[in-house]
Amino acid sequence: MSSVLQRIRPGELLARGGPLAGLVLLVAVMSFLSPVFFTTNNLFNVGTQIAVIAILAFGQTFVIVSGGIDLSVGSVLGLSGIVFGWATAVAGFSLPAALALGLGAGAAAGLTNGLLITLGNLPPFIATLAMLSAARGLALVISGGQPLNPIPPAIQTLGGGDIFGVVPLPVVLMLVMWAITIGVLRSTYPGRCMYAIGGNEEASRLSGINVFNQKLFIYTLSGFFAAVAGILYTARLASAQPQAGFTFELDAIAAVVIGGASLSGGVGSASGTLVGALILGVLRNGLNLLNVSPFWQQVVIGAVIALAVMTDTLRRRRKG
């Protein structure tokens, strides 16, 4: 046991346990400050509130682990919701066909990002920034700038229903996507390639990894996860909104970074991202219960993000 501990550097311990320890401390503080916080209803409320951001962040995790960034996920969420809403409310498609179109729109946007980065040789920041604008514009064009209704009752149930009258369905979907993310990162060849590419892209290429194909898969997967989040968000609103997901990409990136991922690539996990999303959710929920101004809430969350990035920087310096 001692030999194992000796091989673990302090920075690695911080990366593994820091976010979870921070979440536990935050829950303890909020429970002390507000008697309402640590109740079953409120905790499930936190889970429901973070479900969309967490699913977005799971997709973002694939990208950040591979050394990239995806600024378009919020807009892709909105586009996917609008495509789904158009298919059901305007075109009269069946529910399975509408779901396929909505999810396909997200995956297609992600694939386009991948093509811009690989074939177009654009930096991920620029490619996905362009998609951020294009996807939002397409959502406005398709919808005419207006919400699309009605949304099928089965989808509305996904946004507001529960299991056994206890566990909200958005939380269940979030946990399913979390499990899928764990499976991809830990147990698949593309998952291992993500870590390799993020650690050293040129070495990965020389070792036989098809970096071109892997990047296409990574960004397509991110777009698909954004589409799932878009369907869920549409279900929660019971309406397809063209402006849905505005600035959500910032929360998604924040959740991944707070969860211990490195913006330089090669480091990150599904569980860390879930913890990061929970930290954001607990902060917002607790500060609301304490009647803290929304403006000060943004200041606090910004400070937490800065602290997470500083921690990542210190960890990399120790490794170097």
Image (tube, grey):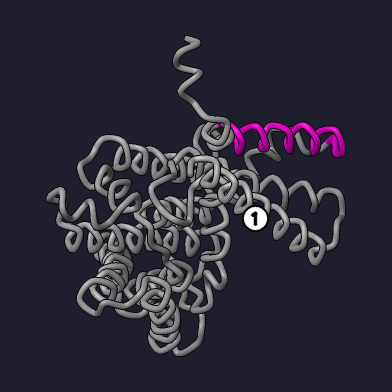
Res. 150 visible in picture:
no
Query: Is 14 or 248 nearer to us in this picture?
Result: 14
Does 299 appear above or below 134? Answer: above
Q: Residue at x 41, y 56 (%)?
A: 64
Horizontal placement of 283 versus 90: left or right?
A: right
Horizontal placement of 295 versus 318: left or right?
A: right
Does 150 appear above or below 260? Answer: below
Q: Position of residue 16 (x, y in %)?
A: 52, 33
Q: Position of residue 272 (x, y in %)?
A: 51, 40
Res. 271 visible in picture:
yes
Query: Is 320 or 300 nearer to us in this picture?
Result: 320
Q: Which residues are magenta?
A: 17-35
Is residue 38 within the magenta segment? no
Q: Residue at x 29, y 58 (%)?
A: 218
Q: Position of residue 119 (x, y in %)?
A: 20, 76
Q: Position of residue 173 (x, y in %)?
A: 43, 45
Say which amino acid is labelled 1.
Ile
| Magenta span dominant secondary structure | helix
The residue pinned by badge 1 equals 305
Q: Secondary structure at mark 1?
A: helix
Query: Is 125 or 270 nearer to us in this picture?
Result: 125
Does 18 appear above or below 111? Answer: above
Image quadrant in which you'd find residue 136: bottom left
